């Protein structure tokens, strides 16, 4: 996508400007919501069709997070957030692969914007500490000065580095991919970029998995028995 072409608001909700990035996020969130409501509208004991597919995703992510975390109760508590991360990031990454997406006014893959990836990373940051206090109470603060008070500055830097690395990793990969596809579309629309788009299917899934796994591991570390 050629960034900067549509920085001005598309429309206003009262005094609030709404740009292309927000519209794309709304579409993705609405799509996930519609699929979820459709899949769970008429629940059957023996799932079929969309219900079966949706349950498979939920069970796979829940089982995966249970393996990462010491307690099943912790995995059960945070699996909805982590699954939402995975689905939103995956669809955001794949939204850039829609034919002609780079030429559609008012369209931008959300994860190609650092504001979105930073917001997701900040949600992880606060979730980590909420999980820590939830499981260990005030004793959770002890890990900031573990194994000694001299480690406090380094431990604080580590806590800041986690959301920063999540932000930069996801943004950098998706932004770079979008730039390459945009320039190839400019040179040879719908022909040359096809191979890169095929590779992007794999990379988009990997980035969604990596972000979710790292978020899960940070929450597991804060809520684990080690604290």
Image: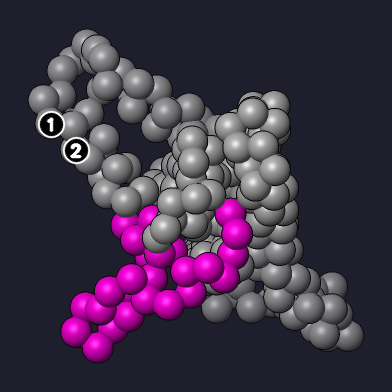
In the structure shown, which secondary structural element does the residue marked by tag 2 occupy? Answer: helix
Which disc, if any, is residue 37?
Answer: 2
Q: Quadrant of residue 67?
A: top right
The residues tagged by marks 1 and 2 sit, at their Cα atoms, a distance apart of 6 Å
The one nearer the camera, 21 or 41, is 21
For the C terminus, the image quarter is: bottom right
| Residue located farthest toward the bottom when viewing the structure as drawn | 15
In the structure shown, which secondary structural element does the residue marked by tag 1 occupy? Answer: loop
Mark 2 packing: few (<14 Cα in 10 Å), some, or many (20+)? few
Mark 1 packing: few (<14 Cα in 10 Å), some, or many (20+)? few
Question: Coloring scheme of the render?
Answer: one colour
| Residue located farthest toward the front when viewing the structure as drawn | 187
Is residue 68 visible in the rendered image? The answer is no
Relative to 220, residue 44 above or below: above
Q: Residue 210's x, y, as percent?
A: 66, 44
Which disc, if any, is residue 41?
Answer: 1
The one nearer the camera, 152 or 7, is 7
Relative to 71, residue 1 above or below: below
Q: Quadrant of residue 199?
A: top right
User: Was residue 179 drawn as part of the magenta stretch in this picture?
Assistant: no
Q: Which residues are magenta?
A: 1-26
Q: Residue 12's x, y, as percent?
A: 25, 78
Residue drawn at the location 24% of the way across and 88% of the way down: 15
Q: Residue 207's x, y, as percent?
A: 65, 44
Residue drawn at the location 64% of the way across and 78% of the way down: 141
Q: Quadrant of residue 46?
A: top left
The one nearer the camera, 98 or 42, is 98
User: Was residue 19 drawn as part of the magenta stretch in this picture?
Assistant: yes
For the N terminus, the image quarter is: bottom right
Residue drawn at the location 32% of the way across and 57% of the way down: 26
């Amino acid at each position: 996508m050629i960034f900067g072409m549509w920085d001005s608001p598309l429309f206003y909700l009262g005094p609030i400007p709404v740009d292309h990035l927000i519209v794309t996020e709304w579409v993705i969130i609405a799509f996930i919501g519609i699929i979820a409501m459709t899949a769970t509208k008429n629940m059957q004991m023996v799932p079929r069709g969309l219900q079966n597919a949706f349950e498979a995703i939920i069970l796979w992510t829940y089982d995966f997070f249970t393996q990462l975390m010491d307690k099943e109760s912790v995995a059960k508590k945070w699996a909805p957030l982590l699954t939402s991360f995975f689905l939103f990031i995956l669809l955001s990454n794949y939204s850039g692969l829609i034919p002609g997406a780079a030429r559609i006014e008012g369209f931008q893959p959300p994860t190609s914007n650092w504001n979105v990836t930073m917001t997701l990373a900040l949600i992880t940051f606060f979730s980590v500490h909420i999980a820590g206090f939830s499981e260990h109470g005030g004793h959770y603060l002890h890990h900031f000065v573990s194994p000694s008070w001299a480690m406090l500055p380094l431990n604080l830097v580590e806590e800041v580095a986690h959301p920063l690395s999540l932000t930069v990793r996801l943004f950098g990969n998706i932004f770079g991919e979008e730039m390459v596809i945009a320039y190839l579309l400019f040179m040879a629309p719908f022909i040359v970029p096809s191979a890169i788009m095929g590779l992007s299917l794999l990379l988009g899934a990997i980035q969604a998995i990596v972000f979710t796994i790292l978020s899960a591991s940070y929450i597991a570390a804060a809520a684990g028995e080690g604290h």
